[in-house]
Image: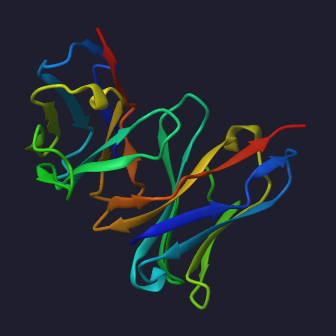
Amino acid sequence: EVQLVESGGGLIQPGGSLRLSCAASGFTVSNNYMSWVRQAPGKGLEWVSTMFDADSTYYANSVKGRFTISRDDSKNTLYLQMNTLRAEDTAMYYCAREALGYFDFWGQGTLVTVSS
Amino acid sequence: DIQMTQSPSSVSASVGDRVTITCRASHGINNWLAWYQQKPGKSPNLLIYAASSLQSGVPLRFSGSGSGTDFTLTISSLQPEDFATYYCQQANSFPRTFGGGTKVEIK
């Protein structure tokens, strides 16, 4: 059974850093495109980043230069390093497997709140 | 970037009604389009991919159509468990983009 479990969210001050994790089971992360999608409170879905390998990473303009997607193949885990956080980064962050551009499995999400 | 525009933003309907949601892309995306359902407090769930292909386990009352820039999600006979928010998403290129969502509410 495919499962994605996110962790690492929390309350952080503006300008701070946070690393989100997404532990996968039931499939191999390194054989798939993996993504992060976020949803601000009461708002719609916003794609954040996608990774296939170290040479194939993609970012939304809103996070480019501040966020870094990566993975640890030995742990079958995806990460999102978030630096220089802003209030507008406040959202539920979902990890998702991407198949041919479609997000076919999603985690339950981890909430990031950027506030002083 | 490809902009995705959904309409309506909300619809009130009764159980048994036929509901249609449209999605328009700012540029042609062939059939690289997905539809998701999201219930309050839950993660999104893939319903339709490649514009008209039903994801495994999704009821047959859901269907998708369209190509190029104009797409439609149809629920043939609305069930109580279908009251939710629906999003379209283009998979033609990066950045991936979503429509603004359509909330299907109980009339």
Observer-nearest residue: B68 or B7? B7
Specify the quadrant that holds the C terminus of chain B: top left
Q: Quadrant of residue A82?
A: bottom right
Observer-nearest residue: B59 or B7? B59
* Image position, residue A35 (x, y; %): 48, 64
With B20 as the anchor, is A12 left or right in this view?
Answer: right
* Image position, residue A15 (x, y; %): 86, 50
Count of all numbered marks drawn on residues in the image: 0
Q: Residue at x 10, y 44 (%)?
A: B60
Q: Residue at x 47, y 47 (%)?
A: B43
With B72 as the anchor, is A23 left or right in this view?
Answer: right
Colour mapping:
rainbow
* Rendered view: A45 above or below A108: above
Q: Residue at x 48, y 42 (%)?
A: B42
Residue A65 visible in the shown view: no
* Image position, residue A81 (x, y; %): 71, 66
With B107 as the anchor, is A110 left or right in this view?
Answer: right
Residue B47 visible in the shown view: yes
With B77 as the anchor, is B47 left or right in this view?
Answer: right
Farthest residue, direction bottom: A74
Q: Quadrant of residue B83?
A: top left
* Image position, residue A85 (x, y; %): 77, 50
